[in-house]
Image (cartoon, rainbow, N blue to C red):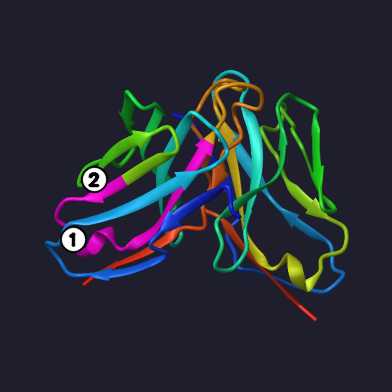
């Protein structure tokens, strides 16, 4: 089984709808991240969390919110989706100890907002 | 601020050709440097890393050397295979081990033809 899983893998929704993307990990890592990937722009950080009570905004947090329900679960919400939020979304994790600067990515969620 | 610049693609090579993907960076301090690979339909996977100047990261026949004097971390492989077709991302962690923030380049798409 994959260490970092994301659901759903694909989602098509309409403008104005509320959407939640979920991420779960079995790596036992404390740190979790949400990125979005747009063609030609690389990956940009949306939010990150160092533990259940520590959530921080990244480079492009406007229009998004997150919830860290447990050490292993980190959800990303779009309260009112808009078309320019169409992108590929990745969850990632990293360890608090040992190899702390390597991040491990999930398979991604492709979101289309019509 | 910190940034990563990598050569624009797409790059198309014949099988067994030599590969170089250029990556240069701007950062204060002593960043850790990474190459991540994204195969079609999948998330990013760590390919190799280097944490200090003159270190060479290597994996699956790929190599990259951390050159502080030229602020570069070019990816090379002596003989590419069709299975190497993917998007390659150069990234840095600005403060080295213990920091969380990854800054990515825009990615370079490699296609290897038989």
Q: How many marks?
A: 2
Residue shown at the point (17%, 57%) measured from the top left: A18
Q: Nearer the viewer, residue A74 or B91?
A: A74
**Furthest residue in direction bottom, as rendered:** B114
Tell me the residue that label 2 is attached to: A64
Tell me the residue that label 1 is attached to: A82
In the image: residue A49, left or right of residue B104:
left
**Residue B21: image location, x then y, percent:** 70, 54
- Picture quarter with the C terminus of chain B: bottom right
Is residue A88 a member of the stretch shown in magenta? yes
> Are both tags, 1 and 2, on one chain?
yes
In the image: residue A91, left or right of residue B112:
left
- Which image quarter: residue B48? top right
Q: Is residue A36 above or below residue B96?
A: below
Q: Where does the magenta region start and end?
A: A76-93
Task: State if disc 2 and disc 1 touch (CB < 8 Å).
Answer: no
Residue shown at the point (72%, 45%) measured from the top left: B74
Disc 2, SS: loop
Pointer 1 chain = A
Q: Nearer the viewer, residue A30 or B92?
A: A30
Where residue B41 is drawn, which disc sits there? Answer: none
Q: Nearer the viewer, residue B68 or A62?
A: A62
């Amino acid at each position: 089984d994959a260490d970092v899983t994301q659901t759903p893998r694909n989602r098509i929704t309409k403008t104005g709808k509320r959407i939640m993307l979920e991420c779960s990990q079995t790596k036992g890592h404390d740190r979790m991240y949400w990125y979005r990937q747009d063609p030609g722009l690389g990956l940009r950080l949306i939010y990150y969390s160092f533990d259940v009570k520590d959530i921080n905004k990244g480079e492009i947090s406007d229009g998004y919110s997150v919830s860290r329900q447990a050490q292993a679960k980190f959800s990303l919400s779009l309260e009112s989706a808009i078309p320019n939020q169409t992108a590929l979304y990745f969850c990632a994790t990293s360890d608090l100890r040992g190899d702390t600067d390597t991040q491990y990515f999930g398979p991604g969620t492709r979101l289309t907002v019509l | 601020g910190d940034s990563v610049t990598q050569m624009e693609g797409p790059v198309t090579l014949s099988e067994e050709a030599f590969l170089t993907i250029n990556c240069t960076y701007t950062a204060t301090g002593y960043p850790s440097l990474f190459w991540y690979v994204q195969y079609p339909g999948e998330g990013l996977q760590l390919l190799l890393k280097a944490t200090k100047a003159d270190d060479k990261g290597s994996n699956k026949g790929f190599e990259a050397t951390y050159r502080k004097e030229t602020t570069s971390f070019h990816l090379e492989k002596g003989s590419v295979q069709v299975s190497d077709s993917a998007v390659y991302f150069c990234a840095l962690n600005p403060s080295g081990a213990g920091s969380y923030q990854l800054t990515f380049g825009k990615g370079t798409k490699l296609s290897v033809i038989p």
